[in-house]
Each structure stands twice: as C-alpha cells, then as structure tokens.
Amino acid sequence: MEQEIITALHLPAGFTVTAHAGAFDTPDNSLESVKTILKNKCELLETDVSFRPDGTPVLIHKGDPDADEGVLFADVLRLIAEDPVIRMNLDLKSVRNLPQIDRLLREYGLFERAFFTGVGEDWIRQVRSESAVPTFLNAEPDKKTGKDPEKLQALADKIRTLGAVGLNSHYSAVTPLCGEILHKNGLLLSVWTANDKPAIRRCLAARPDNITSRHPDLVAQVCLDESKKSCKVIK
C-alpha cells in the first residue's frame, strides 16, 4: 500500500502571514477590515498607525492627519483584545506620540502581541528610545547588495546595532542569500506586500519569517501547493 507524505516547506519555525490593512477587499484601516480579518482567523493583522495633532493614535495611511481623521487605535484594540491569539503588525506613519502606543497596548493586554514596521533609519533611534515594542528596520537592499554576502552582513550588523529585531522589506528586494544571512545573525525577515502567486513564490524562496499580503488565504494556498510539489511517495 502506498502512502503519500507531504513534506513541509523549508520555512523558519514560527512563520506567519500578516493580513494587510484592507485584506479581503475591505476598506484600508477601517473597523470593517479589522472585524473581517478577525472573522477569518488570521495570524496577524496590519494597521497603519499615525497620530492626530493632539497625539491621539489613529489608524490612517497619513503622517499628519487632521483632528477628526482616522479610526481610534483604542477602538481597534478593544476588538483585538477579544481574540486570544491574533498579533499586530503596526506600520508606523508617524512617531509623534509613541509612549501612548505602549500605554494602550499594555492597558488592553496586547503588548506582547505587537511589533512595529514602517521604521526607517531616520526614525529607528527615536522609536527604540521611546517604545519597548519590537521593531523591524525598513530597508530595501539593491540588486548588488542582495547578491553580495559582505554587503548583506554589513546590513545585518547595522540592524543589530540599531536595536531592531530584523528587516522589513518589499518582496522584490529580498533574495535567498538575504534571508540566509539574516537568519545566521539571529535576525528576522518580514516581506511586503505579496498579493499574487508569483510574488508569493518569490517571497518563499527567501525563507521569510513573515509575509504581508492583502490575500492571506492565497499565501496559505501557495504554501500548500509548494509543499505538494516536494511530496514523496513511500511503500
């Protein structure tokens, strides 16, 4: 009797998929989007986070929203707190009042379930000094860097020196060598935003720790398809 064994993809332990703000064809940074992502039992949800002029954190893809713009971050946390496991990828659009983010996350018991992305070199020192939330450094290695072990090692050294937990990059900028060197240095790799099968397959080749997508269900399907390609049949 033959038995089919589907081998797992060679992905890092703890590999996750982030549902991008507006996943499942919902409006970006809306309560509807958050509710839909929660309903679909996603592992992670992404929200763009900024601050109104008075420092109130809100969900909006804008660095300087007006006093009446954006969905209150606190309202979103109330919804998320009802789910026992989902985590948050907080894509910062401003660093105006970071201590308030930490305070609200702790108030709703969600501090251990959040990390920051959207943080470039211009913000990273301020973020690390004003918040205890784990932070990815946003950077996009160029084509030469992506194939050069020494340059990638220099990037890894910079990420560690800046106090970040890993690299957050557009999927088109990462290579398998990039993922390999980051992991050798104890760093994580998060990639965005892979929304179709070719993009997702390209991401998987770099062995990321996280993929952000507007179609998290498609990422799951591609992972399954790629696993089946490497299945073995034993007797």
Image (cartoon, grey):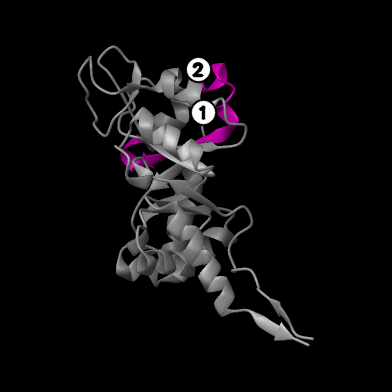
Q: Is residue 6 left or right of residue 95?
A: right
Q: Secondary structure at mark 1?
A: helix
State the residue at coordinates (23%, 15%): 68
- Comparing 45 with 177, the one in front is 45
Q: Farthest residue to the top: give it.
A: 54
Q: Is residue 163 at least partly visible in the picture?
A: no
- Comparing 112 with 9, the one in front is 9
Q: Which residues are magenta?
A: 103-123
N-terminal label among 2 and 1: 1
Q: Secondary structure at mark 2?
A: helix
- Near mark 2 (Cα within 10 A), the count class, few <14, some 14-19 or many ≥20, is few
Which callout, 2 or 1, points to the residue nearer the camera? Answer: 1
Determine which residue is flagged by label 2. Answer: 103
State the residue at coordinates (46%, 27%): 129
- Comparing 223 with 149, the one in front is 223
* Residue type, mark 1 in image: Ile
Residue 52 location, x and y as percent?
27, 18
Depicted 88 relative to depicted 12: above or below: above
- Near mark 1 (Cα within 10 A), the count class, few <14, some 14-19 or many ≥20, is many
- Marks 2 and 1 sit apart, C-alpha to C-alpha, by 16 Å
Q: Farthest residue to the front: give it.
A: 1
* Residue type, mark 2 in image: Arg
State the residue at coordinates (34%, 41%): 22
* Quarter of the image that includes the N terminus: bottom right
Q: Which mark is residue 80?
A: 1
Q: Is residue 200 at least partly visible in the picture?
A: yes
Locate residue 118: give its quadrant: top left
Q: Which mark is residue 89?
A: none
